[in-house]
Every structure is written in C-alpha cells, then in structure tokens.
Image: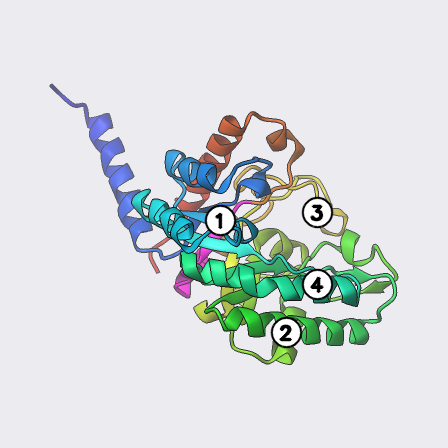
C-alpha cells in the first residue's frame, strides 16, 4: 500500500501536535452540565472517553450517597477509561442567608469524604459580583468568614477550593453594591481567608471581560490555580456590553485570545483541568452527542495552539 507525501505530512503534523501536547500537564475537562448536556456520573465517564476528553467532573452529592465499594468502582472506571478526575462543584451555598449556609456546611463533610475516597483533590465555585444589601466591605468579610469554614472542611479531606470571579460589567453593576470582579480582588479575598487550600478558578471569559492581560496571568504560579475554563466571546460587542449568558465556544470568533491564555498557563506548568462553559443557546439546543463532539473539537483546536514551554 502506497502513501502520498501529503498523507506523510499530515501524519507528521498530527504526531508533532500529539508530542507537543504530551508536554502539557493541564487536561481537557468534561463537565456535562456546563455545555447543556444531562448525564449521570457513569455516562459522563463514558462520554469523556468516547469524545477524547482527558478528565471528567465528579458529582460529589451523588458520590456521597454511595458505599465505599461503589465509590471505589467508579474511581476504577475513570482510571480504566484512561481518564483522571478533574474537579467537583461546591455543594454549599454561601451566597444566601445564614440558615442556608449553615445547613449546607453541615452536609459538606459527607460530600468531602466521598470526594476524597474517589481520589478528588479539587473543588470549584463562583463569586457573585454584586449584592442587594451588603456593602463591598461587609460582603468581603462575609465571604472570608464563610469560605474559611468551607476550606477547613475541604482541607480535612485533602481538597482545594477554586474561586471564580465574574468579570462582565453588565453583572457587577446589576445590583446596588458591586463586589469583587477581578483577579486582583479575588487574591485579596484569598488572603483574607488565610488558609493554604484556596486558590483561583480562572476563566478566559472573565479574564477578558475584566480587562486583564497575559501579564496578570504571569503573576501566578501553578499552586495559585485550582482549575480553569476556556470560552470565547461574541464579535461586534463592546467589552462593557458583553453578556455572561451569551458566550461562544473557544476559537469561534477569536475575540478572546484563548491561545495566549492557554500558553500563559502552560508556561507556569498548570496541571489542572480546563473545561468549556459557553452558556451558548445554539449549543444547548443540539442533541447531546452532537454537543459533546462540537465542544471536544473546539477544545482540541484551542489546545493545538499550545507551544512548548
């Protein structure tokens, strides 16, 4: 069987991309709910393998309902699929009243124990960028106090918490009192929390809408980042007019320099999961198999921009 020069070149290019990407430590992460796909924990693992993702989200609340043996079996299925765990969402709601927070905090040890049993080390959540009644200072204190309590429980189970700031001006001006909406402010909150197992959940969307640059990313170390998100933005929309619920898949428009974002993280040897969270109506309207394939292709296209560090 003969092979053409074009086919040889294509094979060489594919091998080069694969070799280059093998040098990276961050993983292409599947979080089904973030792309509008409904999936059980077992289905998420199957989908991650089928569509070429490298890590998969853990559903902590579900795992907490299982026996140790059942958790071990799920962890084994992740490994046998050639995957690793990415992160899990924080089940505790710290944004509402004290009663809601206290109830969630009481339930957190059970979830944290299950995540630890499964082999997870990362948990993520987001910070609301405005409040109806709390001033900036009061809100900062409440966040520091509540998240310190959360981190204490997570830390007892070998878990780190990533905090995601929300950058769009259309959101932080949407309520009476604006709150933190930038990397620098989130670093301030992390300092006030004052524990070692809390860091950033970075999103290219919020990094962009906060007006931040590669220089801001270069202030970070791998240990400062728990996980990350990768998204693009609609073209023809002014920065201050971007709407959080109207994002684009990575590489869709080129408005956000996702290559610069990824290369900055790769330069510091970031070793965590990176998911896509586009909040895109057209994507959510697709059958789930098509949505998975579309997101996987988009993420792989973006990751092909990673240069050797």
Instruction: Give the image location of residue 30, x and y in percent.
Output: 48, 44
Which residues are the magenta region? 262-276
The Cα–Cα distance between marks 3 and 1, rounded to whole angstroms, is: 22 Å
> Residue 149 got which mark?
2
Instruction: Give the image location of residue 309, x and y in percent.
Output: 35, 60
Q: Residues within 10 Å of mark 1 (few under 14, many from 20)?
A: many
Q: In this view, does 295 lie to the left or right of 133?
A: left
The Cα–Cα distance between marks 2 and 1, rounded to whole angstroms, is: 24 Å
Q: Is residue 126 above or below residue 190?
A: above
> Residue 264 got which mark?
none
The Cα–Cα distance between marks 4 and 2, rounded to whole angstroms, is: 13 Å
The Cα–Cα distance between marks 3 and 2, rounded to whole angstroms, is: 29 Å
In the image, which is nearer the foreground, mark 2 or mark 1? 2
Whether residue 94 appears in this view of the structure is no
Q: Residues within 10 Å of mark 2 (few under 14, many from 20)?
A: some
Whether residue 169 appears in this view of the structure is yes
Instruction: Give the image location of residue 250, x and y in percent.
Output: 53, 42
In the image, which is nearer the foreground, mark 4 or mark 1? 4
78 or 306, nearer to the observer? 78
State the SS at label 2: helix
72 or 273, nearer to the observer? 72
The residue that mark 1 highlights is 57
The residue that mark 4 highlights is 103
Q: Which of marks 3 and 1 is nearer the N terminus?
A: 1
In the image, which is nearer the foreground, mark 4 or mark 2? 4
């Amino acid at each position: 069987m003969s092979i053409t020069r074009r086919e040889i070149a294509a094979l060489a290019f594919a091998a080069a991309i694969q070799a280059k990407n093998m040098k990276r430590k961050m993983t292409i992460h599947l979080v089904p709910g973030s792309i509008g796909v409904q999936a059980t924990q077992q289905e998420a693992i199957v989908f991650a393998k089928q569509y070429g993702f490298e890590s998969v989200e853990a559903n902590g609340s579900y795992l907490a309902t299982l026996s140790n043996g059942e958790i071990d079996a799920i962890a084994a299925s992740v490994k046998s699929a050639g995957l690793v765990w990415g992160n899990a969402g924080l089940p505790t709601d710290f944004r509402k009243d004290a009663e809601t927070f206290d109830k969630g905090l009481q339930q957190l040890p059970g979830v944290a124990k299950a995540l630890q049993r499964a082999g997870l080390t990362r948990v993520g959540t987001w910070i609301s960028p405005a409040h109806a009644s709390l001033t900036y200072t009061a809100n900062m204190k409440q966040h520091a106090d509540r998240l310190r309590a959360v981190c204490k429980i997570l830390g007892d189970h070998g878990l780190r918490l990533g905090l995601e700031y929300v950058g769009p001006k259309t959101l932080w001006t949407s309520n009476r009192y604006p709150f933190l909406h930038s990397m620098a402010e989130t670093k301030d909150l992390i300092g006030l929390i004052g524990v070692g197992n809390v860091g950033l959940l970075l999103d290219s969307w919020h990094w962009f809408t906060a007006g931040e640059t590669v220089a801001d990313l270069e202030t970070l170390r791998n240990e400062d980042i728990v996980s990350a998100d990768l998204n693009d933005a609609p073209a023809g929309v002014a920065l201050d007019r971007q709407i959080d619920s109207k994002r684009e898949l990575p590489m869709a428009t080129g408005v956000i320099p996702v290559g610069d974002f990824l290369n900055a993280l790769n330069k510091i040897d970031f070793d965590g999961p990176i998911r896509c969270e586009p909040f895109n109506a057209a994507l959510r309207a697709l059958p789930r198999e098509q949505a998975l394939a579309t997101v996987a292709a988009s993420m792989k296209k973006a990751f092909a921009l990673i240069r050797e560090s």
